[in-house]
Image (cartoon, rainbow, N blue to C red):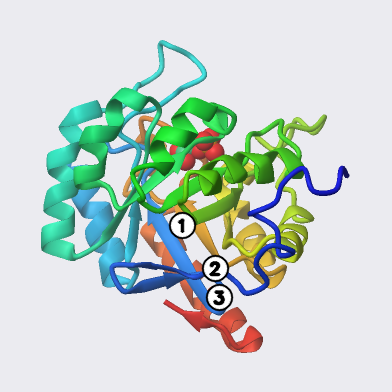
Amino acid sequence: MADCSYKLVSRKYKKENTIININGNLIGEGHICIIAGPCSVETRDQTFEIAEGIAKLGLKFFRGGIFKGRTSPYSFQGVKNDGFEIFQEIKKSLGLTIVSEVTSVSQIPQMINYVDILQIGSRNMQNYELLKDVARTKKPILLKRHFSANIEELLLAAEYILLEGNEKIILCERGIKTFEPMTRNTFDINAIPLLKEITHLPVIADPSHGTGIRSIVNPVGKAAIMAGADGLIVEVHNNPDQALSDGFQSITLQMLSKLLKDTEVICNLLHKKFN
Ligand code: PEP
Ligand code: MN
């Protein structure tokens, strides 16, 4: 690996872990955060049923895509601006912190009024103009690894954000393309401890996209936490088989409850706080 192609992102530049405080909830060393919610916001009722279930389980972070960059242009593309009102209601009535993906610079002015953490999706990890503009909002950014990017390229994408003076970055391992056809992606467990060694930024894992298989989200998620991840982002649906996107990898609220119980056991073992 070329030494020093990245700077600000490295522990050589900053030794101590960056801890991000969002609405009083901490992400980073010692705090395991679980972000849960549907792949896509579909309707108000669907979103509320999932969000209420998540809040009841004691979670603080809600994910939901409203601008969906789908592989096929014929697939559901998201509710777009109609999602803002739903986010506002969820925040107000359930107090959840909202995570949602921004796919274009033109969405930023509205997004920042409703979304607490701006997600950069895998497909946009190297969209540098988008990265710079999102960085300038000073909002926390969830930066997902491109499915064909190596670890250094992920770190360099984060470097673009840091160079804009925004240090509130959460890196996310979400699986990469390999020759294995039985899973949607291959979750790169190596990336977790290696990133934690190289960078001071929080690192979370996405076992939903990392596997593409509902039944193995739990074990892969747990493995990521054992490997040092600062948290998970998981897709949860009230009716996974009817979901408009990524239903096959979405877990039920019941499965989420089990994942949280398991995660708590691991947190105790690792002496980490479970938010
Ligand atoms: C998502 O989080 O729903 C998503 C589209 O993820 P990724 O960008 O990792 O494919
Ligand atoms: Mn998805």
Q: Is residue 12 left or right of residue 63?
A: right
- With respect to residue 130, does 111 lie above or below? below
- Point out the tag, 3 or 1, that comes first from the N-terminus: 1
Q: Position of residue 208 (x, y in %)?
A: 55, 47
Q: Nearer the viewer, residue 108 or 6?
A: 6
Q: Which residue sits at x=38%, y=25%?
A: 104
**Residue that protrudes farthest toward the right in the picture:** 1
Q: Position of residue 190 (x, y in %)?
A: 79, 55
Residue that carries the numbered disc 3 in the rendered image: 262
Q: Which residue sits at x=29%, y=59%?
A: 97
Residue 246 can be seen in this image: no
- The amino acid type of the residue labelled 1 equals Lys
Residue that carries the numbered disc 1 in the rendered image: 168
Q: Position of residue 124 (x, y in %)?
A: 53, 29
**Disc 3 from disc 2: Cα separation:** 26 Å
- The amino acid type of the residue labelled 2 equals Thr
Residue contact at pointers 3 and 2, CB within 8 angstroms: no
- With respect to residue 171, does 268 lie above or below? below
**Disc 3 from disc 1: Cα separation:** 28 Å
